[in-house]
């Protein structure tokens, strides 16, 4: 009898180990040899992978590369798109604890090991683990799919194995792309505030550096911009801002032309912010060359996205773990058939449509 939920180890390219989990509703591929990235998140009823893929593609660490001493360049060269976990740093590289923390932290670059596969009649889950090199943290991730549920559940735990207190940033970087992402999409969220980054203003940016806006409307010299409407691929935009003041931790991106959407929910006490990044044929030069169309909404412990040292100095939104202490979070990514807006998404992945919007 065919199992309702499956898991298998696969090779991408010649050398890159990955795990593929699926049920009757979705399929996801997780890169063991590169950060436990969620490289694929496909909604089976529509046959669409909602995650963006970079034009330069998936790079295989085992096959070697000319690494740059600039950690931003290295991170971007190995960035395949998809969904990363950012830890213990986010954004710019910085110095902390006597070492340079690379851009977005090392958790998204190093290999993870599969330390357990659990399969039942109605579910499958995998447990992944890694121990960082530059920082004394151990990380564990459990990914689970269940029969009949268009949802991926992600449980994470970070543990400080040092004999001293350690500061950190922690977040998720799911980047969405075409064919799912288009000018037909709308964003719904429980955030009430949008904060513009003070420094990373880019080009074709409706946000004024350092300004605070009431989501979703942004006043510009040419009029109001509704940030809940996703720009089309012919509308250049670069944006880095921070969604804040969440009533509850969730957002939904709906494409009514395709007839479905994808959402993410999380406990807002763990991730009180969500970074909003849009790179839409706007940034010249390396690495995007005005040739990328993507958007990420990224739950995070901290702002701004300019490195742990800056966060500690400017906003003090970092987190701290005592020796032996752990922090945990559970997120849920969920698909839903829809043509309208979303009122909310619960922590268990239940999607509530908005009937009067």
Image: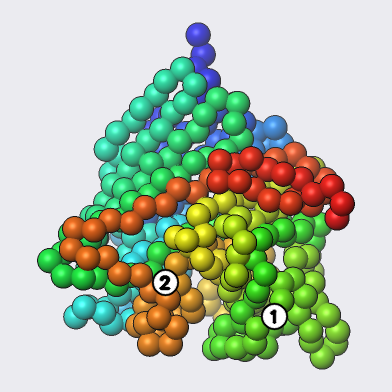
Q: Mark 1 against mark 2, which lies toward the viewer? A: 1
Marks 1 and 2 in Cβ contact (< 8 Å): no
Q: Is 2 situated above or below 113?
A: above
Q: In what quadrant of the picture does the C terminus appear?
A: bottom right
Q: Nearer the viewer, residue 166 or 29?
A: 166
Question: Callout 2 environment at 10 Å: few (<14), some (14 to 19), or many (20+)?
Answer: many
* Element type at mark 2: loop
Give me the C-alpha separation between circle 1 and circle 2. 23 Å
Q: Nearer the viewer, residue 200 or 121?
A: 121
Q: Is 35 situated above or below 125?
A: below
241 with respect to 304 (left or right): right
* Element type at mark 1: strand
Q: Which residue is mark 2?
A: 90
> Could you say which disc has been placed on residue 213 in the image?
1
Q: Is there any visible trace of residue 319 in the rendered image? A: yes
Q: Nearer the viewer, residue 240 or 159?
A: 159
Q: Position of residue 107 (x, y in %)?
A: 34, 60
Determine the image quadrant of residue 221: bottom right
> Could you say which disc has been placed on residue 138 in the image?
none
Question: Callout 1 environment at 10 Å: few (<14), some (14 to 19), or many (20+)?
Answer: some
Q: Position of residue 348 (x, y in %)?
A: 56, 41
Q: Position of residue 296 (x, y in %)?
A: 59, 63
- Please say which color scheme the image uses: rainbow
Residue at 60%, 70% in the rendered image: 245
Residue at 64%, 66% in the rendered image: 191
């Amino acid at each position: 009898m065919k199992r309702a939920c499956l898991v298998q180890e696969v090779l991408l390219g010649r050398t890159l180990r990955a795990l593929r989990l699926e049920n009757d509703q979705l399929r996801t591929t997780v890169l063991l040899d590169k950060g436990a990235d969620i490289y694929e998140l496909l909604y089976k009823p529509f046959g669409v992978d909602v995650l963006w893929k970079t034009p330069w593609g998936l790079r295989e660490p085992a096959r070697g590369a000319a690494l740059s001493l600039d950690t931003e360049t290295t991170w971007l060269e190995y960035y395949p798109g998809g969904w990363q976990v950012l830890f213990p740093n986010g954004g710019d590289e910085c110095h902390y604890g006597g070492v340079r923390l690379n851009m977005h932290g090392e958790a998204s670059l190093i290999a993870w090991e599969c330390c357990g596969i659990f399969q039942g009649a109605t579910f499958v889950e995998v447990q992944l683990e890694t121990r960082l090199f530059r920082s004394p943290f151990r990380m564990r991730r459990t990914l689970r799919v269940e029969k009949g549920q268009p949802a991926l559940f992600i449980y994470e735990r970070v543990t400080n194995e040092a004999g001293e207190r350690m500061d950190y940033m922690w977040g998720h970087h799911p980047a969405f792309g075409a064919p799912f992402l288009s000018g037909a999409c709308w964003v719904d969220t429980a955030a009430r505030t949008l904060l513009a980054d003070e420094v990373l203003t880019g080009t074709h940016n409706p946000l004024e550096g350092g300004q605070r806006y009431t989501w979703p409307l942004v006043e510009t010299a040419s009029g109001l911009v509704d940030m809940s409407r996703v720009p089309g691929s012919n509308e250049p935009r670069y944006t880095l801002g921070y969604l804040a003041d969440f009533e509850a931790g969730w957002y939904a991106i709906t494409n009514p032309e395709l007839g479905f959407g994808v959402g993410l929910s999380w406990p807002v006490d763990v991730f009180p912010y969500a970074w909003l990044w849009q790179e839409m044929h706007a940034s010249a030069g390396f690495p995007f060359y005005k040739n990328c169309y993507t958007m990420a909404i990224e739950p995070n412990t901290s702002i701004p996205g300019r490195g742990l040292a800056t966060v500690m100095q400017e906003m003090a939104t970092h987190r701290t773990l005592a020796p032996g202490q752990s922090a945990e979070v559970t997120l849920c990514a969920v698909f839903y058939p829809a043509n309208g807006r979303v009122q909310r998404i619960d922590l268990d992945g239940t999607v509530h449509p908005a009937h009067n919007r």
